[in-house]
Image (cartoon, rainbow, N blue to C red):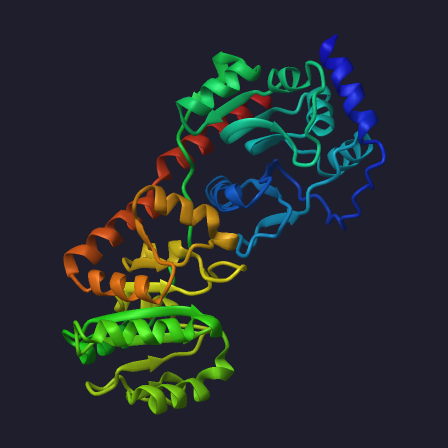
Amino acid sequence: MAYSLGLTLYNLANRAAVASKADRPARPTGLLVWLHAPGPDSLAQITGLAARLEEDHGLNILLTSPTEPKTRHPGVIWQPPPEDTPADARAVLDHWKPDLMAFAEGELRPALLHEAHERRIPVALVDARRPALMRGREGWWPGLMRGLLGSFSAVLAIDHTAATALRRAGADPKIVEITGRMEYPSALLRCNEAERTALAAQLATRPVWFAAALPENEEDMVIAAHGSAMKLAHRLLLILSPQDASRIPALAARIEANEGWITASRSQEQEPTPDVQVLIVDPDGEYGLWYRLAPITYIGGGMGAAGISRDPMEAAALGSAIIHGPRGGQYGAALGRLASASATSLVTDTRNLAATVGELLSPDRSASLAQAAWVVESDGAEATAKTVTALCKLLDASK
């Protein structure tokens, strides 16, 4: 009774919502699983889960999220999520006819979940942290959350705290399973191995650090930090990748004029000979090469409002110790995971950066940081495998 009242009040309160106008492609034939990531904290994990289900099990995948993932498997269909109204819920379920639905984090969309339950579509919570109504629809609706949680077929929680919160909010204890946090998949960036070998031989025992995707407002800071670090290691090489390729000529000229250093430009096929202090490289490629060659990487952008502009897990996967500014931007969730494992170094100014680079010039220290980051990057594979197994069991049971 309370659930029906809460759902009615919720639908009435949101009846003015504008219907979504997504251009929906035709539904593919065969079984279809609908995966939903409510925000950036779960998008990478859900994208990875989608690829696993599509590649390993031949399932059609619909992935919904407020923003389109930067990379996804070609067989995965992306759509923005529908408005949570009864009319939109009916329309989207009529079109896609999913055989299974899985929601991440713990987001509850009452109109959609109710309609799915009425149609006997199994629904799971995956990578679940805490239950909450969808963003922008929070409020007190009698019995609504408890009733919605009671309609799930499986609840896969990231830890004991999450499992307890979900049970207390109304999830059936019999279907709550602690699977852990799913893996954060990042593309293992490739490089030309012959070129890597040749450059590694050329650099020999020179210490190297990499400033990746560096915005203009952080160039002076990195240059000053390099100057300080060279007092500790006079043969230190900085590989610098500016965000804007058009700045390379002026940047090289400024460094040579102001600092008296010798620079080399990758775009002009110049080599990092022993007398070169800064190698300036193009921003639109070869990150896999530089992460492999540099045991230390400063990821640019963290000093500005937009936050870092490269996925830190790319460097983590390739064994480069990570330094970054205080703002994570779109990669805040990834940085949070790394920081919680003490797997990155946070800097706030030039002095911080210079001291950190100097500290990480010790091979033991940079290797320790890189190892911690690699563990975080590779963690969660077991949780993802458990999630895949649970979803496949639900599909088999629903046939």
| For residue 181, above or below residue 337 | above
Q: Quadrant of residue 379?
A: top left
| For residue 257, above or below residue 308 | below
**Who is closer to the viewer here, 90 or 176?**
176
- Quarter of the figure that contains the N terminus: top right
Horizontal side of residue 131 vs 327, given as left or right? right
In percent of the image, x 36 and y 72: which residue is there? 222
Camera sees residue 171: no
**Who is closer to the viewer here, 13 or 51?**
13
Horizontal side of residue 208 vs 23, given as left or right? left
In percent of the image, x 27 and y 73: which residue is there? 196
In percent of the image, x 35 and y 41: which residue is there? 340
Q: Quadrant of residue 211?
A: bottom left
Q: Position of residue 2 (x, y in %)?
A: 73, 10
Q: Position of residue 294 (x, y in %)?
A: 27, 67
Q: Position of residue 6 (x, y in %)?
A: 74, 17
- Quarter of the figure that contains the C terminus: top right
